[in-house]
Image (tube, rainbow, N blue to C red):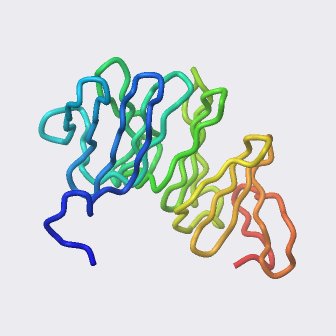
Amino acid sequence: ASDATDPLASVTALVVDDQQKILWAGTRFEGVWRYDFSSHTWQFFNSFNSGLEENRISDLKLGPDDTLWAGTSAGVFRYQSGVWQRDDPSDQLMDQRSNAQELAITSSNTVWIAGIDYLAQRVAGQSWQLYSAIDYPLLADQFDFVVLDDREQPWFIGHQHIVHWNGSGLEAFDLQFHRLSPLVSGQPLPGVT
C-alpha cells in the first residue's frame, strides 16, 4: 500500500548519469530532484526556483551529450550547463501546450516527443519538425509511449493507434489488417480507426 505522505510515491521517472554520478527523479507535482552520489546531496528544481515552468514531470531522458530532457504537461525542457530552458515545438501548436507524454533520444542526439495529438522530431542542431493531428488526422490520439527499434527509428503507441517513423516518413500500423501504411498529410487512412 502506498502512503500519500510518502515523497517517493510521486516519482514518475528516473534516469542515472553514470558519468557525472547523478540520479535524476521526475515527480508528479514537485518538479525534478537531483541526487549527487559523490557529495550525497539533493537539489530540487521546480517552477518556483528554476527555468522549469512545470512541476508535473511525465518523463526524463539523458542525451548522449549529457543534456537532461524533461517531458511535462506544459512542454519539453532541457537542463544543460546548470540551466533549465524550454525546448519544444509549442510555438507551432494551436493551443501552445506541448503535453509531452514521453521522450526518446537516439545516439546521434535526435529527440522524439510522443504527445497528445502530435509527434515531434528534433535532429541535433536543427529546428523541431512537428507532425500534428491538424495535418495528419490519424494523430488525433494520446501517444503515451515511444520506443526506438534496433535502427533507432521510433514507434509511438497511442490509445488508438501505433505509428512508426521509417526514416523518411510516418507509417500507421493497421490493427485490423496487420500492416503498415504511409501517413499522407490531410488524409485519414482507410481501415485505420
Q: Tell me residue 176's x, y (percent).
A: 81, 82
Q: In which quarter of the image is residue 155?
A: bottom right
Q: In which quarter of the image is the N terminus?
A: bottom left
In the displayed orientation, state which residue is furthest to the top. Answer: 81
The residue at 26%/41% (across/down) is: 33
In this rendering, position of residue 178 left or right of residue 59: right
Q: Quadrant of residue 43?
A: top left
Observer-nearest residue: 135 or 72? Answer: 72
Rendered residue at 87%/69% (across/down): 179
* Side (left or right) of 41 relative to 95: left
Q: Where is residue 47 in the image (x, y as percent from the top left)?
A: 18, 42
Closer to the camera in the image, 119 or 80: 80
Quarter holding the C terminus is: bottom right
Which of the two residues, 176 or 42, is positioned nearer the viewer here?
A: 42
Q: Position of residue 140 (x, y in %)?
A: 56, 67
User: Measured along the vertical axis of the image, is residue 179 above or below residue 51?
Assistant: below
User: In the picture provided, is 76 more to the left or to the right than 130?
Assistant: left
Relative to 70, say whether 141 is above or below: below
**Does 39 appear above or below 165?**
above
Residue at (20, 31) in percent of width and height? 41
Image mark count? 0
- Residue drawn at (36%, 29%) of the image: 79
- Residue 183, image x and y in percent? 76, 58
